[in-house]
Image (cartoon, rainbow, N blue to C red):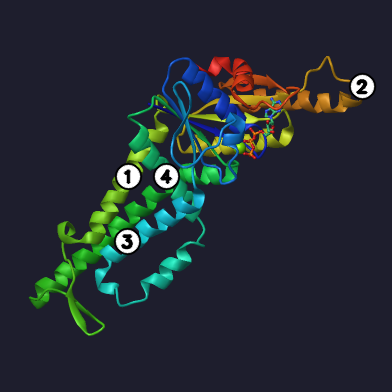
Amino acid sequence: MEIHFFIGKGGVGKTTSAAAYALARSRRGARTFIVSLDPAHNLGDVLGTELGEDAKKVCDNLWASEVDFDAVIARHLKSVAEKIKDAYAYLRVLNLDKYIDTLRYSPGVEEYAVLEKITEIVRKEGKKYEVIVFDTPPTGLTIRMLVLPFINRSWIEKLIELRRAILHHRAMVARLSGEEPKVVIGGKEESLPIDESSDPIMKELKAMLRESEELISMLRDPSTTSVHVVVNPETLPVLEAERACSVLRKFGIPVKSVIVNKVLPEKSLGEEMKAKLEDQKRAMELIKEKFPGLKVVYVPMLPFEPRGIDKLMGYARYIEPLLG
Ligand SMILES: Nc1ncnc2c1ncn2[C@@H]1O[C@H](COP(=O)(O)OP(=O)(O)OP(=O)(O)O)[C@@H](O)[C@H]1O
Ligand SMILES: [Mg+2]
């Protein structure tokens, strides 16, 4: 199974490129699933069909869906709440619900929720499809989401060390006092676990570590994951994309190609566009300088909106070298 992410600044053509790529791969015989992770969905508009949370067959070999962001966040928070309640059964008397309610507004919740959804899609749908394409929201959220497993891993490793120290101290106290350590909350006495195998928190931490490691190996494996960067031939999108790429590179996530979209045709433009063409030339030089070694493809500014199956197939011609 292959996973493809199309990333880039707002409006550069991520959804169009992702849809054209998915369509072209499906036409070449790969069972393909394209998923929009952008809360402001327009994948359905680009493919010319109404989409929802469930995979819908768009044409032969191609399925598509738009992730319901609010539902994903609500489900994520529910699963977090359940885990906290399970692991901290003895803290039930404290007002955990209030804490969980405020989680919705914590920074990072959207990234976690989307990452959880991607993991679920890859696990559940990975067996049904050969190619899964993710159309992502503008750069910031996507990059933060893609590096989350790496950040998680460092945090969890530290938390495991800390938990180990706590259990070790509890065991020491138990040995010295000859009694199991207990806690009294709300008038009720509860035993506290003293070894790793019976500690639900350690079990959860280890499960989280395994999950992060699984995600990291998936994201780092160039035969599974490809990131395609979409830019316009203008300085700002190129610089933003370059920063995003260097972050991904730092974490070992392979960036495969650059799609330079909406390239202005030099010949047919009038005198008044000369300055704009000069900007474009400079941006093209910058692309060569900033993305050495990557496959670069060019898509012209088309005289129509590339929407609907036929026009997307026309768009796909320009990204042919990426289709493998
Ligand atoms: N090569 C092209 N020629 C002409 N119009 C294009 C081209 N590529 C994309 N467009 C148009 O540009 C607009 C933005 O494209 P698209 O929605 O794919 O960008 P996006 O990067 O996904 O945007 P967002 O960040 O809002 O999700 C759309 O109206 C699309 O039809
Ligand atoms: Mg889009």
Q: Report if the CB atoms under discs 2 and 3 are less than 8 Å apart.
A: no
Q: Position of residue 308 (x, y in %)?
A: 61, 26
Instruction: Please state the quadrant of the image where ligand 1 appears.
Output: top right
Residue type at mark 2: give it. Glu
| Between discs 4 and 3, the one toward the N terminus | 3
Q: Is residue 205 above or below residue 266?
A: below
Work out whether residue 150 can be spotted: no
Residue linked to disc 1: 211
Residue linked to disc 2: 271
| Between discs 4 and 1, the one toward the N terminus | 4
Residue type at mark 4: give it. Lys
Counting the numbered discs, the total is 4
Q: Position of residue 24 (x, y in %)?
A: 53, 19
Query: Gap in Å between the C-alphas at discs 2 and 3?
Result: 64 Å
| Between discs 2 and 3, the one toward the N terminus | 3
Residue in view at x 44 percent, y 56 percent: 74
- Where disc 2 sits, the SS reads helix
Q: Position of residue 159 (x, y in %)?
A: 32, 58
Query: Gap in Å between the C-alphas at discs 3 and 1?
Result: 18 Å
- Frontmost residue, 231 versus 171: 231
Residue type at mark 1: give it. Glu
| Between discs 3 and 1, the one toward the N terminus | 3
Horizontal side, residue 10 vs residue 265: left or right: left
